[in-house]
Image (cartoon, rainbow, N blue to C red):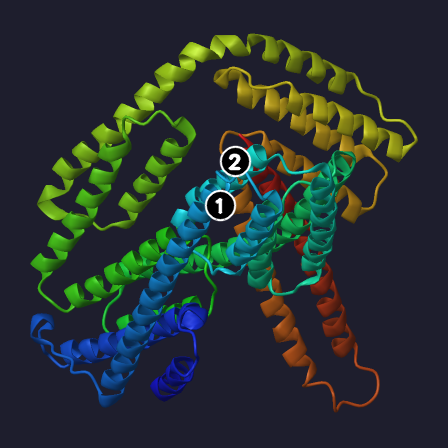
Amino acid sequence: MKTELITKVEELLGQPEASAVAHQMRTLQKEYQQVWTAEFEKAKQEFIDEGGKAKEFEYAKSPEDLKITQLFDRFEKKKKEEESRLAAEQGKNLEIRKEIIAKINDLSQVSENVGSAIKKLIELQAQWKATGAVSPHKYKDIQGEYSKAIEEFNYKLSISKQLQDHDLKRNFELKTELLEKLKAVQNLENIKEAERLIKVYRNDWEDIGPVPNDKWDELKGAYRAALEEVYGKLKAHYNSVEEQKEQNLNLKKELLDKTKDILARSETAAGAMWNTLTNELLAIQNEWKNIGRAAQKDNDKVWSEFRSLCDTFFDKKKAFFAVVNEKMGEIRAQKKKLIEKAEAIKNDTDWSKTGLALIRLQDDWKKIPHAGGDENSLFQRFRAACNHFFEAKKAHFEGIEASYTDNLKAKEDLLEKLNAFTLGDDNNANREQLKQLTAEWNAAGMVPMKEKKRVNDAFYNKLDELYDKMSMSHSEKMMMQFKTKLERFASSDNALELLRKENDFLKKHMDEINNTIRTYENNLGFFKNSKGKNDLLKDVEQKIENEKQKLQDFNEKRKMVSSEMNKLREQTQKA
């Protein structure tokens, strides 16, 4: 692995421009750091397992480590030298542009030989365009000075109408050509190149002077339309990237849940069980490495949590093989950390988010073993922080529940309509009417908390009763009632949490069905060589088909759950 990294780094060092491969080099640096860290942690763990102490562990770098470090240093030196050359070149270009502006300002004072002054101006404009780029921080100011100098020259010399017409026509031709180039950017597959060209063409557009008034509006509209189309493609690309990042985040969250499960099982682990749990966690870590990055704000958070969980696991493993008092100290530290988290958010007024956070902390508290003699005092402190928040939340919502009275009246009226509803012979019409009543119910808004469960249960139970009476296939009826269940979840305060649990529930059952199918398919091998009619073989084949149908139904339900979760996320983002 390190030999391959050294080869790749040497190839990048051979490239003429360090800035062009800087991103690739950073990727290789991260890959090397991950490899080195894995070797370090493995060697350290072996040292500890053999009876060594962590603080006495020393890990010398290999010749490969020294070589790749030298290569990285060479690249950084090369990059800095390149940046210095670029800064010097940009500084030189800035001085040239200042000289050009000074010369244009001098031309503005000329009162005779206008033709010569105009010719000189054209030469200076050509020199301006031929001059290389300046620092982005200086570009706006120097471009403003240049434009001001040109305007001053044109004003004071009162350029003739004939020259103006010529310039306007030429500018129109240049901007038309530039517009075609801008449209062609849409066909580029290289997004970075497209972004670079857009900047170049926008700067060129600003550098080109005015065009005939009768052509300006049309030209400006075409230019803006072309920009919008190009930026639309870029936006679609980055939206696709963000969707992939969201998928990566969900995969990492699943690994977090698995890691938490391992951590929970480690509470009762003893002897060889620790090796089993360690191998499971190492497999999860390898799987984590193969998942791409999530959005920066989320990626750092889940990585920090994952790393924290892994660290906690290995700390617990180490503590298991140490004295009992050290284990008790670790347990107390974990509970103090939960207390600190609870106390840090107990005054928050984001009721839903903070309430869920405290509930998770309470769940985490239950997973931690008894802390011995300090358990009572720790729990009293933790419970006091939780009670502080939930009592404030209760007081807040009791104050606003009065505003939900009208909503309750509207839902009571809808419940009467539903109870009075009579099914007709047309199932499609029945579904549409029930769908409309459900939509009106969801739109009616919040009701007082003490009435919420009563009216929701009455409404959705009646809805299920009507669907049961409709003449539909079992599969269609099942899906219709499942959709009603999701609508009930979506109207709850903790909608997203309920949908996530439902999604996990469905996934768990799908995994069990897949295992069952594999078992049945393995059993088929016992009947392949049998002759004649085999009722047992047909029975197994029929069971496989039944399980596959179940799997298809569960898959359809997961799609419906995902759709509802996406809607909730979109609503949250808009809010």
Seen in the picture, residue 458 relative to 311 is either above or below; the reply is above
Rendered residue at 69%/81% (across/down): 524
Rendered residue at 41%/13% (across/down): 398
Sequence-first tag of 2 and 1: 1
Q: Position of residue 268 (x, y in %)?
A: 26, 61
Which amino acid lies under the numbered mark 2 shown in the image of this protein? Glu
Report the residue marked by disc 1. 104
Other-residue count near label 1 (Cα within 10 Å), few / some / many at <14 / 14–19 / ≥20: many
Rendered residue at 57%/33% (across/down): 155
Report the residue marked by disc 2. 152
Rendered residue at 54%/56% (across/down): 129
Residue 276 visible in the picture: no
Taking depth in this image into account, of 15 and 397 the one nearest to the observer is: 15
Taking depth in this image into account, of 571 and 222 the one nearest to the observer is: 222
Real-space CA distance between mark 2 and mark 1, rounded to the nearest whole angstrom:
9 Å
Q: Position of residue 287 (x, y in %)?
A: 44, 69
Which amino acid lies under the numbered mark 1 shown in the image of this protein? Ile
Is 177 displayed left or right of 33 in the figure? right
Taking depth in this image into account, of 416 and 7 the one nearest to the observer is: 7
Is 230 displayed left or right of 327 in the figure? right
Q: Secondary structure at mark 1?
A: helix
Other-residue count near label 2 (Cα within 10 Å), few / some / many at <14 / 14–19 / ≥20: some
Q: Quadrant of residue 40?
A: bottom left
Taking the view exactly as shown, the residue that stands out farthest to the front is 112
Q: Position of residue 300 (x, y in %)?
A: 36, 54
Residue 487 visible in the picture: yes
Q: Quadrant of residue 344?
A: top left
Q: Are marks 2 and 1 in contact (CB under 8 Å)?
A: yes
Is 370 displayed left or right of 134 in the figure? left
